[in-house]
Image (spheres, rainbow, N blue to C red):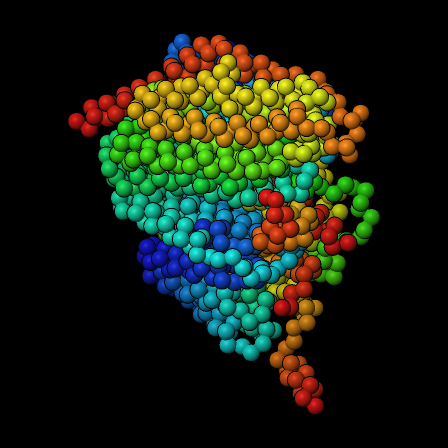
Amino acid sequence: MGDLIDLVLLAMLAITALQMIFLKDLFAVVMLFGIYSFLSALIFINLDAVDVAFTEASVGAGISTVLMLGTLALTGRKEKKSSHSSILPLLVVCITGAALIYGTLDMPPFGHPNNPIHEHVAPRYIEESPKEIGLPNMVTSVLASYRGFDTLGETVVVFAALIGVLALLGVRRQEENDVPESGFKAHHVLHVVARFFIPLIILFALYVQFHGDFGPGGGFQAGVIAAAAFILYTLVFGLSRAFAVVGPKFLQALASIGVLLYASVGFFSMYKGGQFLDYSKLATDPIVGQHYGIIIIELGVGITVFAVMLSIFYAFGSQAERSNIQ
Amino acid sequence: MTEVYTAVTIAILVVMAMALARAISAPTVYDRILGVNMFGTKTVLFIAVGGYLMGRPDFLDIAIVYALINFIGMVAVLRFFEYTAPID
Amino acid sequence: MFILDIISSVLLIAGVFFGFSGALGLFKFPDFFTRMHAASVTDSIATILILLGLILQTSFDINTAKLLFILAFLMITSPTASHALAKSARHGGLLTLPETQVKQQERTY
Amino acid sequence: MLEQHLATLPILLPLIAAPITLLLGRSLFLWIFATAISALACYFSWQLLAAALTESVLSYAVGGWPAPWGIELRVDAANAFVLLAVSALSTLVLIYSKDSIEKEIDSSKHTLYYTAHLLCLAGLSGILLTGDAFNLFVFLEISSLATYTLVSLGSDRRCLTAAFRYLVMGTIGATFILIGVGMLYMNTGTLNMLDLANRIDIYESNRTINTGLAFIMVGVSIKLALFPLHMWLPAAYTHAPSAVTAFLASTATKVAFYVMIRFIFTIFGWNYVFEEMGMDLILMVLAIVAIFKCSYMATVQSNVKTVLAYSSVAQIGYMILGVSLVSVTGLMSGLIHIFNHALMKGALFMAVGAVFYRVGSVDINAFKGLGKQMPLTMAAFTIAGLSIIGVPLTVGFVSKWYLVTAALEQQHWVVAALVLAGSLLAVVYIGRVIEAAYFQKPPASRDSNQVKEAPWLMLAPMWALVLANIYFGIDTSLTTEAARSASEWLFQTSAIAAASSVEVSQ
Amino acid sequence: MMTGFYIVISANNLVKKIVGLNVFQTSVFMLYISMGKVNGGTAPILVEGVTTYSNPLPHVLILTAIVVGVATTSVGLALIIRIKRAYGTVEENEFENQDDAI
C-alpha cells in the first residue's frame, strides 16, 4: 500500500519536473515548483520522515516559492528562446545519470532492516536516545544533541544568507516611506481574514517550537511559520505597516542574538567543565541538562530563522516596491 | 475501517492527479492557480486521511502547515499579479 | 463504536465523491468562472465531510482540536482565496462565457 | 581550560565574532575587532600545530558524544598546518583591507564585509578541522555563502555575474559531494571519517562506493577549480574586491585541495583510490593540461588580476600533480605548495590591490612606469612574481624543487621536464607585468602627483608576506618538517586503515 | 533528479537555473530519506508498543540540507535581482554579449 502511494507520487513528481523543462512561462515554472515541493514533502511523510516533510513544506513550498515570485515580479515572466545548443548539457546529464544508475547497482535493498545504515550508528540513537536525552522525538535528540554542531553550523548558514542578501539588496531606508502603498487596499475580505488568522498562526508557531521535543517540529519549522505569519501580514497590509510592527534593524539584531544564544549554551557547558555543547553539564541531572540545552538552542535556532527569513523577505519586498514606484 | 481509509486515500490521490494535470496544462493562468490551489487543499486532506491510514494521527501538524502555506502562497500569487500583467 | 465507524465511512466517501466531481468540473466546464465555481464549492464541502469523518474517529483529544483547527482554517481561507482569485481574474479582464459570446457577436457585426 | 578546548577555538572565535560584528556597526572599531579575532584564531592554530606535531593527533568530541555518534574534530599535522596558513593569511588580509575596501566597497557595506569575512574564515577552519563527512558539507556551505557575498561586493557590475556563476557551480559541487557522502553513508552507516575509512575497506569493489568516490571527486574538483571545471574562478577573482581576491586566492582553493587529500588518504585510502581506480593517472593528465592551458591563458590576458587568476588555476595544477605522483615527497610538495602559494599569491594580489587603490585600474597598461612611482609595491610584486616562477631563495623554488624531486624519484622524467617548462610560461606572464612597470614610461594621461606609494597599512601585510616568501625560501626547516610529518602521517594512516580492515574482515 | 540537473546546466534564464538547482537538491534529499526507511517501521518518534523505527539520522542530515538549500536559493535570487538592475536582462547569453570580457 505504502509502496503504491510512493510510486504514484513519484510518477507525479517526475511529470512535474519534466514539464518544468519545457514551459517557457516562468510563472508556471514557479507554480510547478511549489507543487513539486509539496509532492516531495508527501513522499517524505510516506517514508516516515515527518520532520523533514514539515521543513520541506514550509521552507521549500512556502518561503522559496514566495521569494521566487518576488524575483519574477522584478525580472519578468518570460523565458526567451535560447540560442545555444543543448547537446553538451544533455551529454553531461546523461553521463551523470548513468553514473548514478551504476551507483545504485550495489545499493543495499530498499527498506531492508539489516542494511548497514541501520546497523552501525543508528541503533544507538533509536535505543539509547530516549534514555540518554529523555525526548520521544529522536530526530530532535539527534539534531540538537548528538549532532548539535551541525545544527550550529546550519544556523550560521542561515545567518550567512542574511548577510549575503543584505549585502546585495539592502533594506530600504525608513525615510523613503512617503509613497503610500498598502497591499490590497480593496480586498476587505482578505484584511479581515488575515487579521483573524495571524495571531493563530503565531500561536501555532509557538506550539511547534515547544512541542518539537515530542512531535514533529522544532526551531526551524517554528521560525519559518512565524516568519510566514509576518509575510502574510506584509503581503496583505503592505511593507510600511509591517516595518512599523517589526523593524528591519531589530530583525538583524535578533538574527545575531539567536546565533549567540545557541553558541552561549555551548560556552556555558565549556565553563561547566564539559565539551562544547555538552548539555549534560548544564544541570546536575544530565537528562534535565539535556532538556534545558535543547530547549534553549531550539529557541536560538527559531529566533534566527524567523529573523532571517523575514529580513530576506523584507529585502525582496522593498526591491519590488521600489521598482513599482519608478 | 482500514479499507475505507485506503479507498479514500487512493481516491484523493486520483483527485490530486487531476488537479495536477490541470495545473500543468491550463488554458489560462488563473486556471493554473486554481489547479494549484485545489491540489493544495487536497494534499491537506490526503495527509489527514493518510495519517489515520498509517496509524500515526499525531502528524496533523503537517496538514496544518500545508493549509497555511497554501493560503500564503495564494496571497503571494495574487499580490504578484499587481506587478505584472497576468493575461498572456 | 460501530455506528460511528459507519457514519464516518459514509462521510468520508461522500466527501471524496464531491472532491472528485469538483476535479471533473475543473475540466468540463466551459469558462473560468464556472470552473472556479465547481472547484471552490466542492472543495469546501469535501473538506467539511472528510474532516468531520475523521473527527468522529478521534477520541476527543488534541487530534480533535487539530482537525477542528484545520477545518476552521480551510473553511475560511479557501473561500477567501477563491474570492480574491475571482476578483483578480475579473480585474485582469477575464470574461464569462456569455460575455465572450456577446463580444464575439459584436465583433462579427 | 583553554588547552582542553583548543581544537574548537579557531572555528568558534570567528563564528561568534561574526554576529557580534553585525551588532556593533562602527567601522574603525570593527576593523580592530575583526583583526584581533582573526589574530587570536591564528595564535590558537599555531598552538594547535605545535600540539599536533608533538602528539600527532588531537581529537575533540563536540557535545561530549563519542566519535561515530557525535561529531568529532580531529587535528593532525596536515590540517593544523593548512589552518595556520589560512588564519595567518586572513589576519594579514584584514589588516590590509582597511584601506583597500575604503576605495572599492561602499561604506554602508563595510560591516557586512567584515561579517562575511569572519564567516568565511569560520567555515574554512571548520572544513579543515572537522572529522565528520556531513559536518564538512555544512561548513563548506558556510564558507561558500560568505564567499559569494564577498565576491558580489565588487564595484564592477560584472562581479554579479561572476558571483552568480560561482554560486551555481559551487552549489552543484556541494550537491555532488552530498550525493557522494550519501552513497558512502548508505553502505557503511556512518559519517565519521575514520569510521568510514575502516568500514569502506571491508567492501573492496563495491560499485556504489566507487560511484560515491567519483561524485565526491568531481564535487571537490569544482570547488578546487581543477582544470576542466575552473571556469568560475577567473571571473570571480577578477571582479571581486582586491582584498577579497587576496584572501580567496590564498585560502579557499587550498582548503578544497586539503579536502581532496583528506578524502583520498583518510577515507578511501590511497592504494584504493590510486591503484584500483587509476585516479592518479587522470589527475596527473588534468594537472599537466591545467598547468599549460592556464599558464598560456595567463600570458594573453590584459587584466593583471585575470592573469593572476589563471596563474592560480595553473598553480593548483602543480599541487594536484604532487598528489598524483603517489609518494611521500610528492604529497609533501603539494602540502608545501599550499602554504607557499598562499604566501606568494596573497602578496601578488595585495600588490595589485594597492595599484588599484592608487591608479584606479588593474589593466596592464596602468602598470606602465609604476616602478618609479610606487617602488615598494612594485618591488613586492616583483619578488612574489619571482617566487611564482620558482627562482632560488624564494618559497616557489622550494615547492618546485620537491615536486621535481618527487617526479624523478618515480622516474617520471617527462613530468619533471614539463614542470620546468611550465615555469617558463610563468616567466612570460609575470615578466610582462614587470616589464611594463619598470621599462615603460607612464602614460601621459596619468597625473603623476596623485600616484604615490600605497598607505602603510597596505604595505605592511604585503611586505610581511614578501619577507615570509624569502624567509621560508631560505630557512625551509619549518615548512618542510611540518609538511613531511603531515604527509608521512597521511600515508601511514592510510596503511593502518588498510591493515586494520584486513583484521576486521578476517 | 537528472531533470533538475539538466535545467541547471541548460537553462538560459537565471531564475530557471535556480529553480533547477532546487529540484536537483530536492531529489538528492529524496535519495537520503529513502535509505533511512525501514520496512514496517514508523516515524522515529517514540510511541508505546512500537519497536521498529525508521533511521532518524538521514532525517537530521536532510533537515540541515534543506535549510542550507533555501539559504543558497535566497542569495542566488538576490543576485538575480541585482543582475537585472545592472544589465537589464536575466538571460545568460544576452549579458555575455554585453560584456565579452568575462
The quadrant in which residue D20 appears is top right
Determine whether D500 is above or below A312 in the image.
Answer: above
Q: Position of residue D224 (x, y in %)?
A: 47, 34
Q: Nearer the viewer, residue A185 or A201?
A: A185
Residue drawn at point x = 49 percent, y = 39 percent: D230
Task: Point out the image quarter for the N terminus of chain A.
Answer: bottom left
Residue drawn at point x = 47 percent, y = 18 percent: D397
Task: Point out the image quarter for the C terminus of chain A.
Answer: bottom right
Q: Residue furthest left?
A: D506
Q: Residue furthest bottom?
A: C109
Q: Position of residue B3 (x, y in %)?
A: 33, 61
Please indicate, yes or no, whether residue C105 appears anywhere in the rendered image. yes
Q: Nearer the viewer, residue A257 or B44?
A: A257
Q: Position of residue D289 (x, y in %)?
A: 42, 37
The quadrant in which residue E71 appears is top right
Q: Nearer the viewer, residue B58 or A186?
A: A186
Residue drawn at point x = 65 percent, y = 73 percent: C94
Please indicate, yes or no, whether residue D68 appears anywhere in the rendered image. no
Residue drawn at point x = 69 percent, y = 38 percent: D155
Q: Position of residue C63 (x, y in %)?
A: 47, 49
Q: Is residue A91 left or right of residue D236?
A: left
